[in-house]
Image (cartoon, coloured by chain):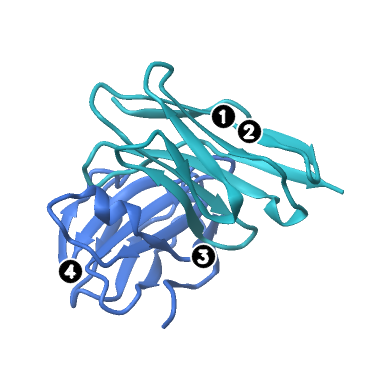
């Protein structure tokens, strides 16, 4: 069965510092992986996705993620965060069907 | 409209009351998804429509939950005899594609702001 684990429920970080949000997945078949961002009182917005090919995926707002099959991870990174990056971030997986499985989310809090 | 619209944004229901949640997808979008997001959790899949056909309803938690999309555009999620455990944010998403490569539907899905249901 598919599952997605986000290892940190909250990540506080100072502005302009780098950040990494961790995500591990489990699946017995090939997976497609996603990161979504949810700003307060808004819907989910797709940040980036991994379907195949290059394991380093670049997304919007300066975020990137690396697919690591041996470690079953898909960690999200940004070299320098802004106050406006404060939001909830969700890692998700899909094995090609209708269902996308989401992690529990990581709240990124950027401090001035 | 420009995005996925959900109404109402907030709903308070007394236990046992029936509720109906509406989703207006982006015009022309073929695929429509409903998700349930409990407090502090990620969204969980409820059901999927391709046009008016409900192709997957395996995520609906009980027979009190019912979804429809009769004309292939607006969708309604109905919950009968609401219980406190139904309290959650209900998210709707739509996507243009209906390709056999199903992942494409999920990679380009656009989410609404959700309806926050509180059952008291």
Share a chain, discs 4 and 1? Answer: no
Question: x, y (%) of residue B90?
Answer: 45, 57
**Residue at 38% in and 28% down:** A3
Nearer the camera: disc 2 or disc 4: 2
In the picture, one chain is cyan; tell me its letter: A
Q: Secondary structure at mark 4?
A: loop
**Residue at 31% in and 41% down:** A51
Q: CA distance from mark 2 to mark 3?
A: 26 Å
Share a chain, discs 4 and 3? Answer: yes
- Can the viewer see residue B64 in this picture? no
Which residue is at the far bottom? B1
Which mark is drawn over residue A20? 2
In-image side of B6 versus A51 (left or right): right
Nearer the camera: disc 4 or disc 1: 1
**Residue at 29% in and 38% down:** A52
Q: Secondary structure at mark 3?
A: loop
In the picture, one chain is blue; tell me its letter: B
Q: Considering only order in the chain, which callout, 3 or 4, is on the residue closer to the N terminus? A: 4
Which residue is at the far right? A112
Question: x, y (%) of residue A12?
Answer: 76, 37
Chain on which label 3 sits: B
Residue that carries the numbered disc 4 in the rendered image:
B51
Q: CA distance from mark 4 to mark 1?
A: 36 Å
Nearer the camera: disc 3 or disc 1: 1
Residue that carries the numbered disc 1 in the rendered image:
A22
Chain on which label 1 sits: A
Share a chain, discs 2 and 3? Answer: no
Mark 1 Cα-neighbour bin, 10 Å: few <14, some 14–19, many ≥20: some
Residue that carries the numbered disc 3 in the rendered image:
B113
């Amino acid at each position: 069965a598919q599952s997605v684990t986000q290892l940190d429920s909250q990540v506080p970080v100072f502005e302009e510092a780098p950040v990494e949000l961790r995500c591990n997945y489990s699946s017995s078949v090939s997976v497609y992986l996603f990161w979504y961002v949810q700003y307060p009182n808004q819907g989910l917005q797709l940040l980036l996705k991994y379907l195949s090919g290059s394991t380093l995926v670049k997304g919007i707002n300066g975020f990137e993620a690396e697919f690591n099959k041996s470690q079953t991870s898909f960690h999200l990174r940004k070299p320098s965060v802004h106050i406006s990056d404060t939001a909830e971030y969700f890692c998700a997986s899909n094995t090609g069907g209708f269902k996308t499985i989401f992690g529990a989310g990581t709240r990124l809090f950027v401090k001035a | 409209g420009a995005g996925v619209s959900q109404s109402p944004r907030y709903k308070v229901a007394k236990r046992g009351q029936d509720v109906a949640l509406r989703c207006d997808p982006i015009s022309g979008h073929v695929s429509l998804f409903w998700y349930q997001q409990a407090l502090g959790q990620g969204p969980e899949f409820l059901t999927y429509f391709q046009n008016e056909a409900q192709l997957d309803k395996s995520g609906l938690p009980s027979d009190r939950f019912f979804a429809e999309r009769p004309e292939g555009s607006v969708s309604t999620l109905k919950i009968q005899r609401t219980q406190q455990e139904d309290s959650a944010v209900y998210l709707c998403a739509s996507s243009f594609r209906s390709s056999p490569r199903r992942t494409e539907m999920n990679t380009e899905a656009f989410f609404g702001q959700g309806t926050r249901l509180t059952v008291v």
